[in-house]
């Protein structure tokens, strides 16, 4: 009989973890495993890319983006229904009060983190037994798998710097002690997580990325639609606090003040859009720092850009950086957890401090030293993220929890 595996994720909006999950699901043998997916909040455009052998358990699903204004409006309405369903808000009320108080004592109230507990309580019930259940993201999916799924084996994934993202054992109610294994997407992510959960059975399982698919999609039509003739700088990422695009906007202003003719494009959506648009106007950069939104296929933009810049507060392991390297971009990244594990400074990219001045100087260095820029592009293009054998070994780390592996 086939082993039954359930994957749970918060949403299926366009993001790195969601893309990595799709790649993982596509590589699990459907002849040996019956794969099911539950999307906790039942929304996200990437569901259209779900492999045909994966069974979607959501009875109702909305494939609008969770990042656009319209999508966030729909998500808020759905979240309200969840909070009122199954007595979720009432059941979570003491927890919400306690965690709000603890957050306010630290001066950092994170509403999204608070509501994941209620979302897990109010999510659809799955009345099946599974050989393994996998929480593929932190927060809601982890709480749901820990408390509401019947499975012989439970596993979780950590995609971010657990501490900087604002998670705590109290917030999680020690949910990760209920998992037989916790997989972190990088060694730095593991170190941080283990500092909070030293007793957890922890390992590293890298995000799966198909470089062949990326290169194939980069050859499709698309990319920049304007007729701009200057330097194009590209960043791909959600418009949220973690990405801290205020620093990039400040760096763009410094470049402009030095007379550099460049245009910076950020492909992504998020709840910081209005704030960032106001800041761009305040800096007088309406024609220089653009927020085109999300696109179905960003890869033509990578190969058409002169530079790829990824200046963020923290990361787990950025798939956008891996994509940029795969497509041979000249890459500049901030020296933070996650990023520094992906870029060998001076070989396949450059590291810089996370300040406006440092990001500006890194960009100027790449623009003024074409020889260095070409060496970095060549080093990035030659970088092999994983070969087929390594990808199978990564998947086996998960399947081996049930005593199973895939044939070589």
Image (cartoon, helix red, strand yellow):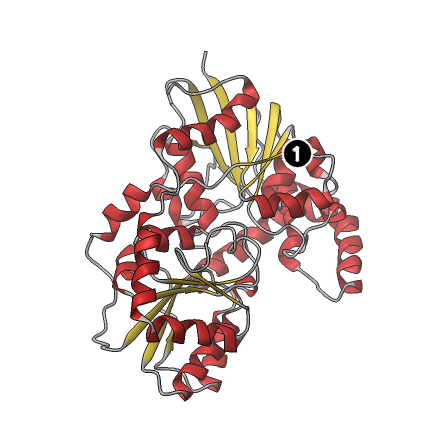
Screen quadrant of the N terminus: top left
Estimate the x, y position of residue 315 in percent, counting from the top left. 54, 55
Estimate the x, y position of residue 63 in percent, counting from the top left. 39, 48
Q: Is residue 217 left or right of residue 391?
A: left
Residue 212 seen anywhere in this rendered image of the structure: yes
Q: Which residue in the protein does label 1 denote?
A: 146
> Residue, x 36% and y 55% (percent of image)?
324
Screen quadrant of the C terminus: top left
- Say which of 204 and 226 sits in front: 204
Q: Is residue 148 left or right of residue 239?
A: right
> Residue, x 79% and y 58% (percent of image)?
102
Tag 1, which secondary structure?
helix
Residue 19, by quadrant, is top left
Estimate the x, y position of residue 134 in percent, counting from the top left. 55, 32
> Residue, x 62% and y 39% (percent of image)?
142
Q: Could you classify mark 1 by the number of other residues whose Cα lies within 10 Å: few (under 14), some (14-19), or many (20 or more)? A: many
Q: Is residue 60 above or below residue 309?
A: above
């Amino acid at each position: 009989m086939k082993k039954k595996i359930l994957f749970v994720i918060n949403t299926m909006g366009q993001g790195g973890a969601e893309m990595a999950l799709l790649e993982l699901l596509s590589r699990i043998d459907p002849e040996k495993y019956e794969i099911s997916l539950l999307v906790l909040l039942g929304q996200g455009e990437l569901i259209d890319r779900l492999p045909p052998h994966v069974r979607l358990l959501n009875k109702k699903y909305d494939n609008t983006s969770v990042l656009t204004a319209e999508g966030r409006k729909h998500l808020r309405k759905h979240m309200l229904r969840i909070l009122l369903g199954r007595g979720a808000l009432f059941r979570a009320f003491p927890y919400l009060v306690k965690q709000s108080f603890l957050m306010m004592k630290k001066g950092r109230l994170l509403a999204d983190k608070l509501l994941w507990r209620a979302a897990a309580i109010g999510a659809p019930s799955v009345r099946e037994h599974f050989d393994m259940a996998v929480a593929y993201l932190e927060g809601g999916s982890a709480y749901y798998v820990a408390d509401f799924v019947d499975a012989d084996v439970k596993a979780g994934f950590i995609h971010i710097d657990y501490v900087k993202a604002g998670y705590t054992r109290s917030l999680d109610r020690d949910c990760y002690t209920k998992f037989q294994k916790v997989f972190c997407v990088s060694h730095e992510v593991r170190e941080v997580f283990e500092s909070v959960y030293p007793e957890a059975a922890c390992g590293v399982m890298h995000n799966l990325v198909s470089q062949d698919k990326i290169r194939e999609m980069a050859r499709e039509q698309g990319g920049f639609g304007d007729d701009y003739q200057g330097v194009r700088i590209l960043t791909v990422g959600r418009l949220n606090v973690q990405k801290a695009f205020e620093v990039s906007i400040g760096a763009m202003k410094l470049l402009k003040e030095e007379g550099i003719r460049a245009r910076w494009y950020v492909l992504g959506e998020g709840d910081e859009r209005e704030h960032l648009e106001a800041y761009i106007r305040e800096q007088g950069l309406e024609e220089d720092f653009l927020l085109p939104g999300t696109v179905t296929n960003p890869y033509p933009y990578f190969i058409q850009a002169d530079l790829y810049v990824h200046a963020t507060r923290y990361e787990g392991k950025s798939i956008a950086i891996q994509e940029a390297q795969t497509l041979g971009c000249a890459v500049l990244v901030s020296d933070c957890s996650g990023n520094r594990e992906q870029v060998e400074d001076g070989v396949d990219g450059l590291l810089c401090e996370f300040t406006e001045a440092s990001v500006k100087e890194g960009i100027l260095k790449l623009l003024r030293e074409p020889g260095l820029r070409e060496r970095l592009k060549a080093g990035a293009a030659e970088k092999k993220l994983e070969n087929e054998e390594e990808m199978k070994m990564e998947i086996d780390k998960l399947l081996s929890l049930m005593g199973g592996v895939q044939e070589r």
